[in-house]
Amino acid sequence: MTEEQFWESTPRKIIALIDQKNEIEKVRQKNQAIYIAMYVWGKDPDEFEEKERGPIPGVDIPIDPSVINKLF
């Protein structure tokens, strides 16, 4: 969008553009968080694709309390 188009647009369009940018930033942050977590823990991201993923600890199966204590 050029600057001229920007100033000619309605406030509703500007708000929609801001909302879209915020959504894109949220997705970007989530992707970066996943990348960092995978890199730090040494996991291969390809292991966790939807078709190959098994039960998720804490979601599908309960987490062992002793494991949680080790995190702190």
Image (cartoon, rainbow, N blue to C red):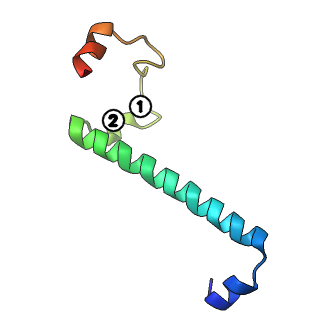
Residue 7's tag is none
Q: Tell which circle, 1 or 2, labels the residue nearer the N-terminal end.
A: 2
Q: Position of residue 35 (x, y in %)?
A: 32, 46
The amino acid type, in three-letter code, at marker 1 is Glu
Measured along the vertical axis of the image, is residue 22 above or below residue 60? below
Number of other residues with Cα within 10 Å of mark 2, as a class: few under 14, some 14 to 19, many 20 or more: few
Measured along the vertical axis of the image, is residue 27 above or below residue 38? below
Residue 52's tag is 1
Label 1, secondary structure: give it. loop
Q: Position of residue 47 (x, y in %)?
A: 33, 35
What residue would you read off at disc 2? 47
Q: Position of residue 53 (x, y in %)?
A: 42, 29
Number of other residues with Cα within 10 Å of mark 1, as a class: few under 14, some 14 to 19, many 20 or more: few
Circles 1 and 2, Cβ within 8 Å, touching? The answer is: yes
Q: CA distance from mark 1 to mark 2?
A: 7 Å
Measured along the vertical axis of the image, is residue 8 above or below residue 72? below
User: Seen in the image, is 38 located left or right of residue 10?
Assistant: left
Quadrant for the N terminus, please. Answer: bottom right
Quadrant for the C terminus, please. Answer: top left
The amino acid type, in three-letter code, at marker 2 is Glu
Q: Quadrant of residue 68?
A: top left
Q: Quadrant of residue 2?
A: bottom right
Query: At x 38% / y 35%, what residue is drawn?
Result: 48
Q: Position of residue 71 (x, y in %)?
A: 25, 21
Query: At x 24% / y 43%, what residue is drawn?
Result: 39
Label 2, secondary structure: give it. helix
Query: At x 23% / y 35%, what residue is drawn?
Result: 41
Q: Residue furthest bottom?
A: 4
Query: At x 41% / y 31%, what residue is drawn?
Result: 52
